[in-house]
Image (cartoon, coloured by chain):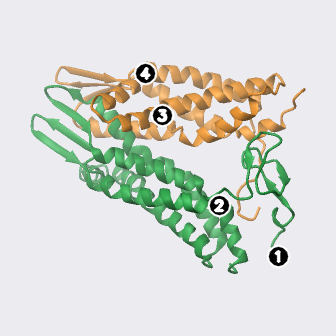
Chain colours: A orange, B green
């Protein structure tokens, strides 16, 4: 087209495959949030944080705005994104167009730019380097989970919800 | 090269949500996905201007106020964004210094300048190359989110470094200002209707 963007492209992955990726991503997402990201040891003192712990710490010290921002971009929006995609793909798979299909699809497109798992991943790496000078660190389970989640999200996000309109529907 | 016929000239417009093409009308509901379709996003330019100006104002405290406050046995230190960059540069990781400098200083600034230029171009019909303008728009739309990096770093450090006796890191007022700048510029970019870039052709030959 005249502005040089790709107008439409059919995705390599079939909706069924994307569905599998979404389910996997949801599981990894749970792990990423349930376990500590890094364990920190300084002279016998021990500290670990989960993502939720970081948000709670921000909230507790009076930076509610920032806590909300971090919570929304790393937890709420990615989770909403995954759940919406799951519901939409499920409906498309069953060749249904329930009443919530269209509003949810529009909602998904509004939510999408605000999920920032991949940016957060980079943030984790930067803080690790920053802290490596002052403390011994043991990467936690959630760090790997986030790394995997980043890859999965990249694959899922390359699937444009647009194209669900081209899936056959029975009604 | 002859200009292709535009949808508006052909009496058509496309739904921004699902891509369905419908007859041109001041505003209508998309028959397929139910979204409201406008030929151009309403008040696009004034909304982007308002958000952009708010972001520029907040950009000043975001850089001047500390984003992080470290209290340790050896006293209290406050870090601004630039301070973090300098720290990495001196502590032997220039790569990270460059990365942080680009995402937290260069990108927000370039983004605001570019969006400003695009808005001015549309407002006054500046004869800039429209292909470049459209390309620039896609770049700032893609790159904007990465500026959140510093906010996440601060959040993690705050969560991690909580050794009551040894050291405690707290978020400074600059961090929320910076987060707001990133969010505002993202909304400003999204409320700017890139189709306006192509409308300037009717006022100034590009």
Q: Nearer the viewer, mark 4 or mark 1?
A: 1
Of tags 2 and 1, which is closer to the observer? 2
Nearer the observer, B34 or A39: B34
- Give the distance between the C-alpha atoms of the residues marked 4 and 1, in whole angstroms: 58 Å
Q: CA distance from mark 3 to mark 1?
A: 47 Å
Q: Secondary structure at mark 3?
A: helix
Q: CA distance from mark 4 to mark 2?
A: 43 Å
Quadrant the N terminus of chain A occupies: bottom right
Residue B195 locus on image (x, y percent): 69, 62
Q: Are marks 3 and 1 on the same chain?
A: no
Please name which of the two marks, 4 or 2, marks the residue nearer to the observer. 2
Q: Earlier in the sequence, mark 2 or mark 1?
A: 1
Q: Residue under label 2, please give it.
A: B194
Location of residue A161 in the rendering, given as x and y in whole percent from the top left corner: 72, 38
The residue at 45%/57% (across/down) is B107
The circle drawn on residue A72 is 3
Q: Residue at x 60, y 32 (%)?
A: A81
Quadrant housing residue B6:
bottom right
- Mark 2–mark 1 Cα distance, whole angstroms, equals 21 Å
Q: Quadrant of the C terminus of chain A?
A: top right
- Residues at badges 2 and 1 in contact (C-beta under 8 Å)? no
Closer to the N terminus: mark 3 or mark 4? 3
Q: Which mark is residue B21?
A: none
Q: CA distance from mark 2 to mark 3?
A: 27 Å
Between tags 3 and 1, which lies in front? 3
The residue where tag 1 is placed is: B2
Could you say whether the residue bearing mark 1 is in a helix, strand or loop?
loop
Q: On what subunit does the disc labeled 2 rest?
A: B
Query: How many residues crowd around disc 3 within 10 Å: few (fewer than 14), some, or many (20 or more)?
Result: some
Q: Is residue B125 left or right of residue B155?
A: right
Q: Residue lying furthest right in this view?
A: A170
């Amino acid at each position: 087209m005249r502005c040089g963007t790709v107008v439409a492209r059919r995705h390599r992955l079939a909706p069924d495959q994307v569905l599998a990726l979404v389910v996997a991503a949801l599981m990894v997402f749970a792990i990423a949030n349930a376990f500590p990201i890094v364990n920190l040891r300084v002279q016998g003192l021990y500290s670990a944080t989960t993502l939720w712990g970081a948000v709670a710490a921000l909230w507790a010290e009076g930076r509610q705005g920032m806590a909300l921002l971090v919570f929304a971009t790393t937890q709420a929006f990615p989770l909403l994104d995954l759940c919406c995609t799951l519901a939409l793909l499920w409906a498309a798979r069953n060749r249904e167009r329930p009443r919530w299909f269209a509003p949810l699809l529009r909602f998904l497109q509004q939510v999408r730019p605000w999920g920032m798992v991949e940016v957060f991943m980079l943030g984790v790496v930067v803080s690790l380097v920053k802290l490596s000078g002052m403390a011994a660190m043991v990467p936690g389970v959630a760090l790997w989970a986030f790394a995997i989640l980043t890859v999965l999200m990249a694959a899922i996000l390359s699937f444009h919800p647009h194209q669900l309109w081209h899936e056959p529907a029975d009604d | 090269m002859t200009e292709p016929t535009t949808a508006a000239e052909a009496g058509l417009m496309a739904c921004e949500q699902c891509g369905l093409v419908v007859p041109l009308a001041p505003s209508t509901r998309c028959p397929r996905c139910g979204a409201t379709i406008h030929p151009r996003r309403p008040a696009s330019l004034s909304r982007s201007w308002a958000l952009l100006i708010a972001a520029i104002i907040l950009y000043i405290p975001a850089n001047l106020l500390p984003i992080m406050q470290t209290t340790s046995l050896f006293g209290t230190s406050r870090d601004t964004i630039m301070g973090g960059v300098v720290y990495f540069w001196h502590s032997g990781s220039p790569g990270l210094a460059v990365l942080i400098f680009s995402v937290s200083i260069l990108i927000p600034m370039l983004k605001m300048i570019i969006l400003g230029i695009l808005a001015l171009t549309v407002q006054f019909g500046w004869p800039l190359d429209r292909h470049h303008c459209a390309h620039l728009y896609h770049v700032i739309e893609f790159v904007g989110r990465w500026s959140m990096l510093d906010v996440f770093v601060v959040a993690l450090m705050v969560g991690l470094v909580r050794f009551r006796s040894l050291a405690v890191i707290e978020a400074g007022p600059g961090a929320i200002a910076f987060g707001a700048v990133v969010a505002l510029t993202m909304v400003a970019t999204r409320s700017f209707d890139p189709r306006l870039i192509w409308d300037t052709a009717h006022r100034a030959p590009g």
